[in-house]
Image (cartoon, rainbow, N blue to C red):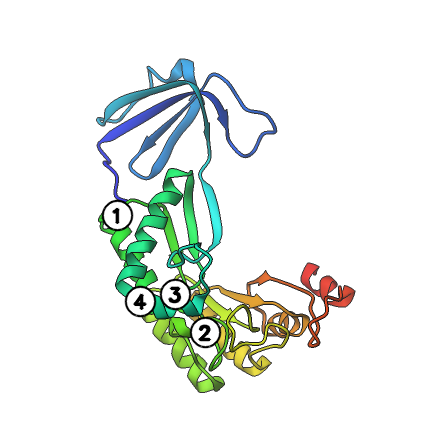
Amino acid sequence: MPQDNNILRVILPGKLIDGIGTQPQEGKAVAIQGNSIKWVGSAADADNLDSNGATKEIMEFPGGTLLAGLFDIHTHTNMPGDGRTGEQINLDDNDEIRLLRSARNAATAIASGVTTMCDCGSWNRTGFALKEGLSAGLVEGPRVLVSGPPLTVTGGHLYYMGGEADGVAEVRKMVRNLVKQGADFIKIAASGGSTSTSDPYRAAYSVDELKAIVYESHNRGRPVLAHCRCTDAINAALDADVDAILHCSFYDNDGQYRYDQETAERLAS
């Protein structure tokens, strides 16, 4: 969200949690200009802080606690959280409604202290439109990193978002198209999930397909996050050198949970 760079806001909280120390600190001040933290120091020095020509605004919250912004690293801003399945939302809503809901969810996030969130899968262009709207100041919200529709096999997890791609040639083209639209990272449904036409206990993509996705993404400076609900998918994602694995559940193809030490050691290495 654009901010006024001509105002230096000096916040004087009762306590400060900086995320580094183990205890809240008292007698501290934080100066913010635009979207940047310009200074952190003693509250006693706040009055003499040089604003370099900007208007200085003192904000006192003696009974409040100031803490660093929170990161929410796995969201789906299109989702209502009302108990409906993704398939039902796909049938009930259109992209216009989904985009409005994303805007509302982004406003809720910033009001709760989330300053950065990752949208790990949204319908068609809605995630990109949300990001553009935030950048233009049309809606309130945190910084949002978006993947757009997750890459998924035909009928795979979250297929209804618009990211179906099969085979090396198709996944390469899909990654290039997502980057063209403004994707900050690439999300892969490397296994099935809650989508009824998918199988959460089997790897969805071959290692060759995953390697093609990773190559195209890394070649364009984009990290790759893989949804993995089974051990086979975790190992395939590791073979392809993805950057992060989401869910990371040790389920075998028969649907039984079996912790796999060898896979765990690969994850930790």
Q: Are marks 2 and 4 in contact (CB under 8 Å)?
A: no
Q: Residue at x 26, y 39 (%)?
A: 3
Q: Which residue is mark 3?
A: 89
Residue 206, percent from left and from top: 58, 82
Q: Which residue is mark 2?
A: 151
Which callout, 2 or 4, points at the residue further toward the start of the chain? 4
Disc 4 on helix, strand or loop?
loop
Q: CA distance from mark 2 to mark 4?
A: 14 Å
Q: Which residue is mark 4?
A: 125
State the image quarter where residue 31 is shown.
top left
Which callout, 3 or 2, points at the residue further toward the start of the chain? 3
Which callout, 2 or 1, points at the residue further toward the start of the chain? 1
Disc 2 on helix, strand or loop?
loop
Reply above or below: 151 against 64: below
Amino acid bearing label 3: Ile
Q: Quadrant of the C terminus?
A: bottom right
Q: Residue at x 37, y 42 (%)?
A: 110
Q: CA distance from mark 3 to mark 1?
A: 23 Å
Q: Are marks 3 and 2 in contact (CB under 8 Å)?
A: no
Q: Nearer the viewer, mark 4 or mark 3?
A: 3
Q: Residue at x 33, y 45 (%)?
A: 107
- Give neighbour class at mark 2: few <14, some 14-19, many 20+ (Cα, 10 Å): many
